[in-house]
Amino acid sequence: MQQRKMGADGPAISALGIGAMSFTNVYGPTDEAQSFALLDAALEAGVTHLDTANVYGRGRSETVIGNYLAARGAETRERFHIATKAAIRAEDGRRWFDNSREHLEGELDKSLTRLGTDAVDLFYVHRRDPDVPIEEVVGTLTRLVEAGKTRGFGFSEIAPSSLRRAASVAPVASIQSEYSLWTRGPELGLVQACAELGTTLVAFSPVGRSMLTDHPIPMERMGECDLLPEMPRFQEPNYSANMAIADGFRALAAEMGLPAAGLAIAWLLAQGDHIVPIPGTRSVDHFHEFVAGTKAALTPEDLARIEQVLPVGWAHGERYSKAQWVGPEIY
């Protein structure tokens, strides 16, 4: 397995990670046995980075990981680089973001209990509260590092300008952002700022929430998913338009001898040594399709062919609904 750095001075991690939202029912029914099988496969393949959050299944994702570590023995914890997130709050139908020291530390403590570990390797602020200066938030995060509760810190879905402000206070290990062949927004400055500052760009939804795979979620199964029905790209007529265009990518992947998901991962890895994709799945077989992408060395000609099939801006529809856009910084 390829290795990449988590931050300029951070540890080496696998070039491929696992997005552990899939350990909940967000993309369809799953159970702990399926998640355990996936984690076993990850260890066998040399995949070490696990990316979860306190809100994934209201703590269920973290609990599954904690149960796995307890079942497999203490040495298994040291084989994984574990990241979690906090800052999203919801109560009585209201959703908001809390970047206060009290909230972040309190939620991290709860996450550590669920994960069954004394410290995580990376702690993200899941959504930025614009009313709290990001420099102040970095101060909170550095204190959590000093307290031994996390070994590094980062942010999710922030703009390049916010990253630069944060990095002026202390090195930021990672920024998490949606980045894939159908979400190219990070190329408008975030990819470049991360490279310049030595910050790892952790790319979530790298296979377009199944659209860039050989088996995209069909419309008749959309009701099983918590998030997708609200997303404009998975609503008609956008869904059918996107499926038709992505068929060309699937055909190209087959011609190149790769699963479509593997080609999507290989494309991301080719965009910079500081990029780590974290696909999620409930299937071990599908996981191995991701791993195949880490073994593919794409040539400039390969990249040009991919660009021809899926040019920048090809996707129909916004990636988020109006409600889902509350929180991510737009730039």
Image: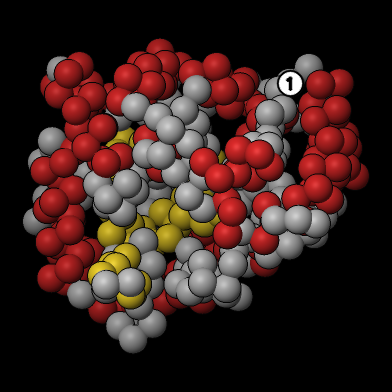
Residue closer to the observer: 211 or 295: 211
- The residue at 61%/22% (across/down) is 289
- The residue at 31%/54% (across/down) is 55
Would residue 67 be found to the left or right of residue 27 on screen? left
Would residue 237 be found to the left or right of residue 41 on screen? right
Where residue 188 sits in the image (x, y, percent)? Answer: 67, 67
Would residue 251 be found to the left or right of residue 67 on screen? right
Determine which quarter of the picture holds residue 118.
top left
In the picture of the structure, the residue carrying the numbered disc 1 is 258
Q: Which amino acid, mark 1?
A: Leu
Where residue 35 sits in the image (x, y, percent)? Answer: 36, 25
Residue closer to the observer: 287 or 198: 287
- The residue at 20%/16% (across/down) is 72
Tell me, yes or no, if residue 306 can be seen here: no
Residue closer to the observer: 66 or 80: 66
- The image's colouring method is secondary structure
